[in-house]
Image (cartoon, grey):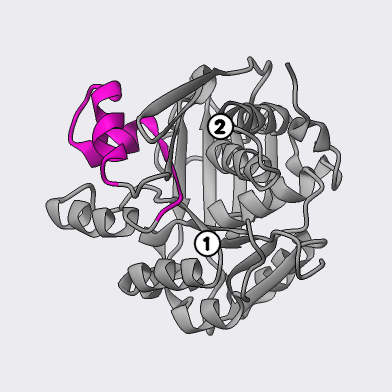
């Protein structure tokens, strides 16, 4: 990549996902149940975002961590074609088992593994000075305790190095306590793109009505920052400087696996933003990207660049 080209860097959680389904009812303890569909793949929000970028034909930089076991070596193979900078940690690789239920809901079991060992020093050592227009997407800070402890400083430094800072907070395991809300408000002041889902938006605002919650969260951002709220199948809305735009979602048929839906949207939206798309077109690109990826199972069947059409502008 030329040094004068905008860069797309992704910093966050990289792990292994085992997706299984469909589960019609919870089995009795001590029994065994066969499930007809499964996929072992790279997972975690950061890896999901990087893989979505590869599907779109981009060459992102992925900064994260892996363990020191055989799964770590396998994980590296799944990330071929992506510029990876992964801190090797003296730990088992984090793994999630995702059970997909017949009603569309999901249940996850996740090991602690290596995620707790990723350090701010490693991230900053592999985050170069950026060309104008570059974006750094930070994911899952609540799962990365060493990064979380210095997260404001990381965001400030990324901005100082020339990046637009994008953040997907994810859900705090301890819930949205008053301490967590105060912590997150400190992060939001440094964001250029804040990417949340509907429930996260209302939780941060402390308001169960979406529209007033959007206004409350938007006031926590700096002038010119984009608040993006993902609405699932209903699409997405964006707000910047008091002006709102909504894009109605594209119906995607026969979706078995919704894991990574928000990460796919994030990548499509940010990729379009890298190309100077306006807010409506960037929301559309995010929705198209998610709608193109979710029906595909297994996901590893998607070729690099196969979904580049998702970034085209449509009237």
Q: Quadrant of the N terminus?
A: bottom right
Badge 2 density bin: few <14, some 14–19, many ≥20, Cα 10 Å: many
Query: Residue 24 at what x, y percent from top left?
Result: 51, 23
Horizontal side of residue 207 vs 193, given as left or right: left
Residue at figure coordinates x 78%, y 51% from the top left: 58
Q: Are circles 1 and 2 on residues that touch, CB within 8 Å?
A: no
**Image quarter of residue 286:** top right
Where does residue 202 sit, x and y in percent of width and height? 27, 32
**Mark number, residue 279:** 2
Q: Which residues are magenta?
A: 191-220
Q: Secondary structure at mark 1?
A: loop
Give the side of residue 72 with respect to residue 157, left or right.
right
Say which residue appears at 27% left-offset and 46% top-offset.
220
Image check: 284 left or right of 137? right
User: Which residue in the structure is indicated by mark 1?
Assistant: 13
- State left or right for residue 71 relative to residue 4: left
On whether residue 212 falls in the magenta region, the answer is yes
């Amino acid at each position: 990549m030329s040094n004068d080209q905008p860069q797309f860097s992704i910093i966050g959680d990289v792990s292994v996902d085992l997706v299984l389904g469909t589960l019609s009812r919870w089995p009795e303890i001590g029994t065994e149940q066969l499930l007809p569909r499964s996929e072992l793949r790279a997972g975690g929000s950061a890896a999901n975002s990087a893989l979505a970028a590869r599907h779109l034909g981009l060459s992102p930089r992925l900064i994260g961590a892996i363990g020191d076991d055989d799964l770590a070596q396998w994980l590296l193979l799944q990330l071929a074609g992506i510029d990876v900078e992964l801190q090797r940690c003296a730990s088992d690789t984090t793994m999630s088992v995702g059970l997909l239920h017949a009603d569309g809901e999901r249940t996850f079991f996740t090991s602690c593994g290596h995620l707790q060992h990723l350090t701010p020093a490693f991230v900053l050592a592999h985050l170069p000075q950026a060309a104008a227009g570059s974006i750094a997407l930070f994911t899952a800070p609540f799962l990365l305790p060493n990064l979380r402890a210095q997260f404001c400083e990381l965001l400030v430094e990324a901005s100082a190095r020339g990046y637009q800072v994008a953040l997907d907070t994810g859900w705090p395991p301890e819930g949205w306590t008053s301490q967590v809300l105060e912590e997150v408000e400190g992060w939001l002041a440094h964001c250029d793109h804040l990417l949340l889902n509907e429930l996260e938006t209302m939780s941060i605002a402390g308001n169960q009505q979406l529209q007033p919650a959007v206004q409350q969260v938007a006031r926590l951002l700096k002038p010119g920052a984009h608040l993006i709220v993902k609405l699932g199948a209903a699409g997405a809305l964006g707000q910047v400087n008091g002006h709102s735009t909504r894009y109605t979602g594209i119906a995607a048929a026969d979706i078995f696996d919704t894991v990574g839906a928000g990460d796919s949207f994030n990548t499509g939206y940010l990729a379009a933003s890298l190309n100077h798309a306006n807010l409506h077109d960037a929301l559309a690109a995010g929705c198209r990207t998610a709608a193109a990826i979710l029906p595909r199972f297994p996901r590893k069947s998607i070729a690099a660049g196969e979904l580049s059409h998702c970034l085209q502008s449509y009237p």
